[in-house]
Amino acid sequence: MASIKPLGDRVVVQPLEADEKTESGLYIPDSAQEKPQKGTVVAIGPGRVENGTKVDMTVSEGDEVLYGKYAGTEVTLDGGDFLIMRESDIFGVIEG
Amino acid sequence: MASIKPLGDRVVVQPLEADEKTESGLYIPDSAQEKPQKGTVVAIGPGRVENGTKVDMTVSEGDEVLYGKYAGTEVTLDGGDFLIMRESDIFGVIEG
Amino acid sequence: MASIKPLGDRVVVQPLEADEKTESGLYIPDSAQEKPQKGTVVAIGPGRVENGTKVDMTVSEGDEVLYGKYAGTEVTLDGGDFLIMRESDIFGVIEG
Amino acid sequence: MASIKPLGDRVVVQPLEADEKTESGLYIPDSAQEKPQKGTVVAIGPGRVENGTKVDMTVSEGDEVLYGKYAGTEVTLDGGDFLIMRESDIFGVIEG
Amino acid sequence: MASIKPLGDRVVVQPLEADEKTESGLYIPDSAQEKPQKGTVVAIGPGRVENGTKVDMTVSEGDEVLYGKYAGTEVTLDGGDFLIMRESDIFGVIEG
Amino acid sequence: MASIKPLGDRVVVQPLEADEKTESGLYIPDSAQEKPQKGTVVAIGPGRVENGTKVDMTVSEGDEVLYGKYAGTEVTLDGGDFLIMRESDIFGVIEG
Amino acid sequence: MASIKPLGDRVVVQPLEADEKTESGLYIPDSAQEKPQKGTVVAIGPGRVENGTKVDMTVSEGDEVLYGKYAGTEVTLDGGDFLIMRESDIFGVIEG
């Protein structure tokens, strides 16, 4: 599978699958599903350079993270649909 | 319960419950309730880095804070609905 | 009474009461009253930090100040309605 | 008369009176009068602080100045209607 | 005649007169005339201060300059209609 | 063939050809084709200068890169249609 | 012929003539012609000053350059129609 190495402070996030059926078993079309705001970090960039100083990344691959409803850009890679966003679009890391 | 560790200068705030009934006992639908502007800080980030210098957080977990009507982003965690906002969206700490 | 300790360079201002009656004694509803642009500073923050340097506040508690028609955010505390604004929203201090 | 001490690099300007009558003696209502762009500086702030350095004011009280049609905010003080603007809103000083 | 001393990096420009007649001698009303983009510098400010350093002016009084269609603000002084603009609104100096 | 030497931190990207036929062999007009977000870097600039310091480029000629749907400006050179974008418009480099 | 000496980091570009006839010989009115994005640099400014440091120009007079569809401002000089733009509006230099 082809993978992507993000530039700067970007991260690739695999969104958690939204359940496509309601509890009663009805199929929900895409437009009616609430877009998930949780996902797993699958790749991180080397970090951005600010005024000549490298700023290290805070999140790591494998972290489950929370992000805004409109964060990032959707890209389609071999392994499915992903979001590429800047680390600053990530609100926090989900623990426990 | 899963919890969230905010990144940078973000804080997780649990909004104070808006009373869902009027004094006379009538139920008020969500859209007619005045959105609360007070809440309790339940998690804080490590602080942001500005030009290579760490800027410490001013608020602490447990602080009752006041914030703008449109501050932050709503997120749903196990423990209910929360707001994630930057510390700069907080107006002040309520005392006494 | 609960009070608020503003963060950064914010100040809490108690607006001067607008006269709710005309000189002839007619009651004026809120929407027809000219919003006051004068108020009294009742709480000030510690000042903001700019590039690592603390910038002291210029106004003090008790100062009568002048501010723009749309300055600040209205908040309701125990003691009534107040405005929280940044010091930079204050035009000047009224003297004499 | 109460006066105002401007904060930062703000100045209080007393606009020149617009003639309220045409040459033929007709009264002109406010909305039809061309808003004056000239006025007299009646109070100046201490100057702004930029990166820790004080920037002195360029205009002085008594200067007749030229400013943009939409510069400043109108305030009503005891002595009449004034404009509070930043010094950067002033185009220049009228001489001679 | 009253003159104006511009503040900062502003310049006073006297626009070149647009010909008010077509070649065939017809009068052209103001709204149909192409606004001139050339003019003569009649006054310059002392230059702006950037981070504590004085930045000298590049144009001089008497220079014939080219500027954008919407540059500057029109002001009326004793000697006619002028434009006050920042030096950065000037594209270049016409030579020869 | 004429080539272009980008200025600053710009790169010239040759977009991957979008398939112009569906699997069933139908021709798809341009407007219905999903614009590709992948391409090959064919030229890079020397890098931008930030506060007097040269910031080296991260991508190299030949890199297969991923970019946003609306990144860059389309230009037509001898060799076909290309996109010129800033390196910061590139999300990452596709590997493997 | 009068010429213009650009200020700062501006350049004067002479756009390449758009062919005014189709291959079949039909005349194309201005509005239907694709605006050219190529041109020749005919004058350059001395370069801009950034925080007290002179930033040299990258392009030279005579360079054939590529720029955005909406770059610059059209000016009419003795020698025809030109575009005045900032060097940062130029994508790159066409070689070979």
Image (tube, coloured by chain):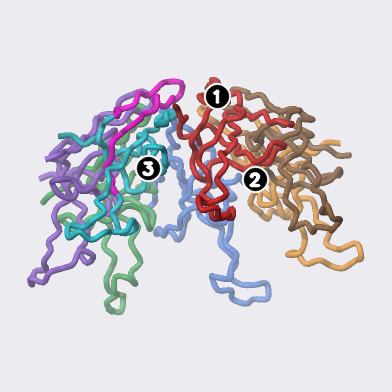
Chain colours: A brown, B red, C cyan, D purple, E green, F orange, G blue
Considering depth in this image, is B11 or E44 the residue closer to the camera?
B11
Q: Position of residue B26 (x, y in %)?
A: 55, 55
Q: Secondary structure at mark 2?
A: strand
Between marks 2 and 3, how big is the CA–CA gap? 51 Å
Same subunit, labels 2 and 3: the answer reads: no
Q: Dot 1 falls on which chain?
A: B
Circle 3: is it few (<14), some (14-19), or many (20+) Cα within 10 Å?
few
Q: Hey, what amino acid is under mark 3?
A: Asp
Same subunit, labels 2 and 1: the answer reads: no
Please report the residue visible at 17 percent of the width from the left and 54 percent of the height from the top. E77
Mark 1 highlights which residue?
Answer: B60
Between marks 1 and 3, how big is the CA–CA gap? 26 Å
Mark number displayed over residue F85 = 2
Q: Hey, what amino acid is under mark 1?
A: Ser
Q: Which segment did they paint magenta?
A: C36-61
Mark 3 highlights which residue?
Answer: C81
Please report the residue visible at 50 percent of the width from the left and 24 percent of the height from the top. B58
Q: Hey, what amino acid is under mark 2?
A: Met
Query: Residue G78 occupies which quadrant of the picture?
Result: bottom left
